[in-house]
Each structure stands twice: as C-alpha cells, then as structure tokens.
Image (cartoon, rainbow, N blue to C red):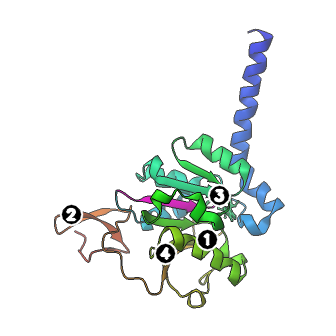
C-alpha cells in the first residue's frame, strides 16, 4: 500500500473512531459540559426505546418528531418500528451530535437546532400532519416559563396532539395542571439507567384522537387494522 493510501485509510479509521466515540461517550462528555441541557450520561436503553415506540401514534400520512435525539437510540427504534425515514424529523441542538445523526440515519430529516424554534424548523407543509412528538429534553430541570416555550412550540406544529416525554422522575416531570395539560404515565421500565417513565401530555381541552394508530402490536377493529394503545385499541376495539 502506498503511503498516501495508508494515510487516507488511517483518516478513515480516525473518522470512524470519532463517530463510535461520539456514540459511546457523546452524552457523558456533553453532560460534563452542560448537565442541564443533556440530562443523562448514557443513551436510552433498548427497553425504554421499545416502550416509547409502543406508545407512539402515527397515521400512515403523518410524520413523527423527536426532540433531543442525542446519539439516536430512539430514532433507531422508530425506524426499526417502520417509521419511514422521510417521515421522521429529529431535532438536536448540539452540532456534533446532529452531524453524527445525519451520518447514522441517511434519509431522516435531521435538524440541528433548538426545539423551542420548532415552528420554523419543521417545514410548513408538515404542520398539522404530525402523529406524535417525542420529547427527550429534560424539561423537569427548567423553569415553568421555559417549559412553556417547548410546550407552545410543540402545540404550534402538532395542534391538539400533545406529546410523549420520557423522564427519570418518580412523579410527573411537568406540572401538568399549571400548563393546562392532562397527564398519563403510559409506561415504566427499570431496565434503563436511571429507571424511566414514559408520560403522555395532552392539551386539557383536546378530544381523543380516533384516527391515530400506535406503532405497537396491531389488532383488527371493524375490519381495519388498529394498533394497541394501553392494551386496548384507540377506537375501542378489543384485542384478540
Ligand atoms: C437526555 S438526552 C436524550 C438523548 C437521546 N434521545 C436518548 O434517548 O439517549 C437530551 C438531549 O436533548 C438535547 N437538547 C437539549 N436541549 C435541547 C433543545 N433546546 N433543542 C434540541 N435538543 C436539545 C441534548 O443535547 C441531548 O442530546
């Protein structure tokens, strides 16, 4: 091998190592720099991702938004559950992580930006066509007025849909009543570090979403495939 080829192969190895290290140690090093923004030292576990995916709702023509994608474990699980890459929007504020997400998930809409700017980050034609928003940003660490900015940004692009939020808190990470939201703890797993819950927040005034389908197991209701939602179908059908 010529010296030039060896040098370029070595560069390739270094780039690959950098990506793997970002994956392995990305959250830890980001957490050391900015613990409030990062919120966790390790990526979400497969058990937590599975629970999140199970609770995620999306009709075939709708997209899913993930806020605070980090090193991408939740994005990967969403793709594995069948969300088409072009219908997945992932938002990450740290440029290095956004760059890694772009490399890891070709075809996914990776947006480097602040989730509080969601209305300008998500293309206009997708506003109102969002099945679900999954928020991994540690909102519990923020002041109420700051939390409100995230909630308003989500509501602007996904009106009436609410959002999923995973958290390590034992109780609700958001003061739901103060934000005029209803809350439900939809899942919990000890198989995460730290153990985590999946919360669903909805605008208190919103009505149920009869057309929404989960990405979880499918049952048939009135001749139509319907996905499971907390053990029952969203339109009231029973699982066989
Ligand atoms: C707890 S980590 C979750 C990472 C990943 N989703 C996982 O499950 O392992 C939170 C992530 O949110 C990102 N983040 C924090 N504030 C943000 C904001 N305002 N907009 C977009 N991303 C943000 C952080 O950089 C970090 O990657």
Q: Secondary structure at mark 2?
A: strand
Q: Which residue is mark 1?
A: 195
Q: Secondary structure at mark 3?
A: loop
Disc nearer the start of the sequence (1/3)? 3
Q: Which residues are magenta?
A: 61-69
Cα separation, mark 1 vs mark 3, equals 12 Å
Front position among marks 2 and 1:
2
Q: What is the quadrant of residue 54 in the picture?
A: bottom left
Label ID, residue 162: 4
Question: In this orientation, does residue 157 appear?
Answer: yes
Front position among marks 1 and 3:
3
Q: Which residue is mark 3?
A: 43
Decide whether residue 194 is among the magenta residues.
no
Disc nearer the start of the sequence (2/1)? 1
Q: Which residue is drawn at the image coordinates 69% and 59% (left, top)?
A: 42
Q: Estimate the x, y position of residue 48 in percent, counting from the top left.
A: 54, 64
- Kindly check if marks 4 and 1 are in contact, taking CB atoms under 8 A apart as contact: no
Decide whether residue 62 is among the magenta residues.
yes
- Kindly check if marks 1 and 3 are in contact, taking CB atoms under 8 A apart as contact: no
Cα separation, mark 3 vs mark 4, equals 24 Å
Disc nearer the start of the sequence (3/4)? 3
Is residue 206 rendered to the left or right of residue 118? left
**Residue at mark 3: C-beta within 8 A of ligand 1:** yes
Q: How many marks?
A: 4
Nearer to me, 6 or 152: 152
Which quarter shows the C terminus? bottom left
Disc nearer the start of the sequence (2/4)? 4
Dot 3: few (<14), some (14–19), or many (≥20) neighbours within 10 Å? Answer: many
Front position among marks 4 and 1:
4
Question: In this orientation, does residue 192 appear?
Answer: no
Cα separation, mark 4 vs mark 1, equals 23 Å
What is the residue that sits farthest to the top in this orientation? 2
């Amino acid at each position: 091998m010529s010296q030039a080829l060896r040098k370029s192969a070595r560069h390739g190895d270094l780039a690959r190592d950098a990506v793997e290290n970002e994956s392995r140690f990305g959250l830890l090093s980001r957490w050391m720099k900015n613990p409030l923004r990062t919120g966790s030292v390790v990526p979400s576990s497969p058990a937590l991702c599975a629970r999140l995916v199970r609770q995620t709702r999306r009709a075939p023509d709708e997209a899913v938004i993930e806020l605070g994608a980090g090193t991408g474990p939740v994005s990967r699980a969403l793709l594995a559950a069948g969300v088409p890459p072009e219908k997945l929007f992932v938002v990450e504020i740290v440029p290095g992580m956004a760059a890694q997400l772009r490399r890891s998930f070709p075809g996914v809409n990776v947006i480097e930006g602040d989730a509080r700017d969601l209305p300008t980050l998500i293309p206009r034609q997708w506003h109102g066509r969002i099945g679900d928003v999954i928020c991994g940003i540690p909102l519990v660490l923020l002041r109420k007025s700051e939390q409100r900015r995230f909630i308003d940004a989500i509501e602007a692009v996904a009106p009436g849909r609410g959002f999923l939020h995973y958290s390590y808190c034992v109780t609700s990470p958001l003061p739901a009543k103060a934000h005029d939201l209803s809350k439900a703890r939809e899942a919990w797993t000890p198989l995460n570090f730290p153990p985590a819950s999946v919360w669903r927040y909805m605008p208190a005034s919103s009505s149920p979403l009869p057309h929404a389908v989960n990405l979880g197991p499918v049952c048939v209701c009135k001749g139509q495939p319907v996905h499971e939602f907390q053990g029952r179908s969203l339109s009231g059908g029973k699982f066989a």
